[in-house]
Amino acid sequence: MSSSLSSILADIVLQNLEKETLRRLNIDISFYYWYVNDVAIAVPHGMIDNVLKVFNSFHDKIQFTLEIGGDNLIF
């Protein structure tokens, strides 16, 4: 059973991750949504690999995967 403090600490870490990675990217993002453990973000097509690299460089124990939507759908 986890402590009630663990979810608060996780939120703080993820908010810091979000703030730092978006600052590092320094690109125009059409939209960015974070829900529980999913992120939906719209970036220029040529920047997809760089965005993933920046998110994954925040901490070696926090790693993101990538799914690319198509036909106006997010998978």
Image: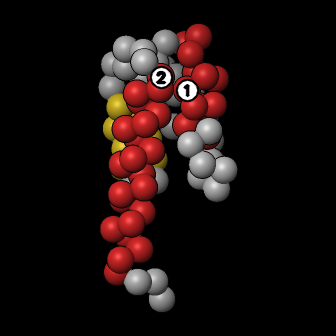
Q: Closer to the camera, 35 or 2?
A: 2
Q: Which residue in the protein does label 1 denote?
A: 51
| In the rendered image, the vertical position of residue 4 relative to residue 67, given as above or below | below
Q: Closer to the camera, 30 or 50?
A: 50
Q: Tell me if residue 67 can be seen.
A: no
Mark 1 lies on a secondary structure that is helix
Q: Name the amino acid type tagged 2.
A: Leu
Earlier residue among tags 2 and 1? 2
Left or right position of 74 against 8:
right
Q: Name the amino acid type tagged 1.
A: Val
- Splitting the image into 4 quarters, where does residue 19 fall? top left
Farthest-out residue, bottom: 1
Q: Which colour scheme appears in the figure?
A: secondary structure
x then y, percent, for residue 28? 37, 14
Q: Which mark is residue 38?
A: none
| In the rendered image, the vertical position of residue 4 relative to residue 15, given as above or below | below
The mark closer to the camera, 2 or 1, is: 2
Question: Which residue is at 33% across, 68% downward?
Answer: 8
Question: Mark 2 packing: few (<14 Cα in 10 Å), some, or many (20+)?
Answer: some
x then y, percent, for residue 70? 52, 22
| In the rendered image, the vertical position of residue 32 relative to residue 6, given as above or below | above
Q: Tell me if residue 53 can be seen.
A: yes
Question: Mark 1 packing: few (<14 Cα in 10 Å), some, or many (20+)?
Answer: many
Image marks 2 and 1: residues in contact by CB distance under 8 Å: yes
Mark 2 lies on a secondary structure that is helix
Question: Which residue is at 45% across, 44% downward?
Answer: 17
Question: Which residue is at 46% across, 83% downward?
Answer: 2
Question: Which residue is at 46% across, 34% downward?
Answer: 21
x then y, percent, for residue 42? 42, 23
Real-space Cα distance between discs 2 and 1? 7 Å
Q: Which residue in the protein does label 2 denote?
A: 25
Left or right position of 52 against 33:
right
